[in-house]
Image (cartoon, helix red, strand yellow):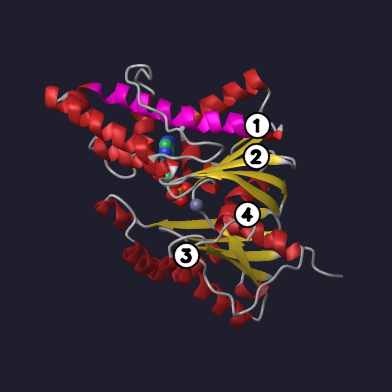
């Protein structure tokens, strides 16, 4: 009888996290993430340093993932890896490693689109969580992405809108930097915002048609606002930290929620699945809960470790592709720009 248990080793290296996971079908046996601390000193991800750190991390991270899962390389059914989108130097490390390992073990190779993986992370088996039913709307919000996608089936997705400039996580991080907060500032804005009044200061919302986003104007308006106020009072930021954070966060959340509402109006779909690091934000979680109660939406947020960049989400796509017999060959190349559905 055919063995119904498929063991997938997944590798993610698109940005600044080196990650490896082992899945048995839809279940995660291990999910190891080495976050590169080096970028903190620079206030953002430095591509060259990221690539070098991936090279150092990849072997130990894969070893650890196999050891934690208690799986031997010989038991693996396939290797899944992130082909793109992402930083080319970073993607190359994971891609080359996955290709050589699959070749050495003589098992199938599966390429994965990182943005599809953020969405399909909702199908990782988890006793505490239910998966959305098709069709649903997915909003991926992180330091690298801001996208609303209509998901009709596992591999039938349509991007309805995305950011034209900065990602929403960047809007958080860059605003935090202007306030003198360390990188990444998103979680700190969240923390201070809880203690502040969101109505204290008003920032303009961008005028972008349809379901696209823009966050660069917000950053500029915060910059001018802080310059103006600190000229009058050099201690303005420290004296008003909570209220500034609450007001900035409120503006960002208004932008996200307005676009989500528009997507719901346009599609008639009220199941909303959120992913990406910004899904950790307590404000957005509160707003989604409100929408469930007031608007009848059904919302889904995966466990935090499956929201931020991780290999488990690559593994679930690997499994779904394995089931469909969708494999790739050794001629595959990493793709820095890789749109969903392309
Ligand atoms: O998914 P992620 O770990 O990495 C990528 O960018 O792909 O997301 C990191 C982003 C950062 O911009 C960080 O500031 C933001 O997620 N973030 C938050 C919160 N936690 C993480 N932003 C707002 N509130 C949070 N609680
Ligand atoms: Zn990501």
* Camera-side mark, 2 or 4: 2
**Residue 43, relative to residue 244: is it above or below?**
below
* Camera-side mark, 1 or 2: 1
Q: Secondary structure at mark 4?
A: strand
Badge 3 vs badge 4, beta-carbon distance below 8 Å: no
Residue 334 x, y percent position in the rendering: 52, 70
- Mark on residue 264? 1
Q: Secondary structure at mark 2?
A: strand
The prevailing secondary structure element of the residues shown in magenta is: helix
Q: Residue at x 15, y 25 (%)?
A: 235
Q: Separation of disc 3 and disc 4 at Cα?
A: 15 Å
Of residues 220 and 60, which is closer to you in this image?
220
**Residue 72, relative to residue 32: is it above or below?**
below
Residue 139 x, y percent position in the rendering: 57, 41
Badge 1 vs badge 2, beta-carbon distance below 8 Å: yes
Of mark 1 and mark 2, the one earlier in the sequence is 2
- Mark on residue 61? 3
Q: Separation of disc 1 and disc 4 at Cα?
A: 32 Å
- Picture quadrant where residue 258 is located: top right
Q: Is residue 122 magenta?
A: no
Q: Separation of disc 3 and disc 1 at Cα?
A: 40 Å
Q: Which residues are magenta?
A: 240-263
| Side (left or right) of 8 relative to 66 | right
**Pointer 4: what residue?**
28
């Amino acid at each position: 009888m055919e063995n119904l248990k498929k063991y997938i080793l997944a590798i993610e290296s698109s940005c600044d996290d080196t990650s490896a996971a082992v899945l048995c079908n839809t279940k995660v046996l291990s999910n190891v993430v080495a976050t590169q601390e080096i970028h903190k000193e620079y206030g953002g991800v430095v591509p060259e340093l990221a690539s070098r750190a991936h090279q150092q991390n990849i072997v130990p991270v894969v070893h650890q993932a196999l050891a934690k899962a208690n799986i031997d390389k010989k038991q693996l059914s396939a290797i899944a890896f992130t082909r793109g989108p992402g930083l080319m130097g970073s993607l190359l490390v994971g891609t080359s490693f996955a290709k050589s390992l699959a070749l050495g073990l003589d098992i199938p190779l599966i390429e994965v689109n990182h943005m599809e993986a953020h969405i399909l992370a909702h199908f990782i088996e988890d006793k505490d969580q239910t998966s959305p039913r098709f069709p649903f709307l997915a909003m991926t919000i992180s330091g690298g992405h801001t996208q609303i996608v209509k998901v009709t089936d596992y591999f039938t997705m349509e991007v309805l809108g995305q950011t034209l400039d900065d990602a929403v996580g960047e809007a958080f991080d860059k605003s935090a930097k202007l306030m003198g907060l360390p990188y990444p500032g998103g979680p700190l804005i969240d923390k201070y915002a809880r203690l502040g009044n969101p109505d204290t200061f008003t920032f303009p919302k961008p005028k972008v048609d349809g379901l696209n986003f823009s966050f660069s104007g917000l950053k500029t308006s915060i910059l001018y606002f802080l310059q103006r106020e600190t000229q009058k009072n050099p201690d303005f930021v420290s004296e008003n930290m909570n209220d500034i954070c609450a007001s900035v966060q409120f503006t960002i959340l208004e932008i996200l929620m307005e676009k989500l509402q528009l997507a719901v109006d346009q599609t008639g779909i009220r199941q909303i699945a959120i992913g990406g690091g910004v899904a950790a934000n307590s404000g957005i979680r509160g707003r989604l809960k409100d929408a469930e109660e007031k608007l009848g939406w059904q919302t889904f947020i995966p466990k935090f470790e499956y929201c931020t960049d991780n290999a488990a989400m690559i593994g679930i796509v690997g499994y779904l592709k394995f089931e469909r017999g969708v494999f790739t060959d050794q001629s595959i190349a990493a793709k820095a720009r890789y749109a969903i559905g392309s």
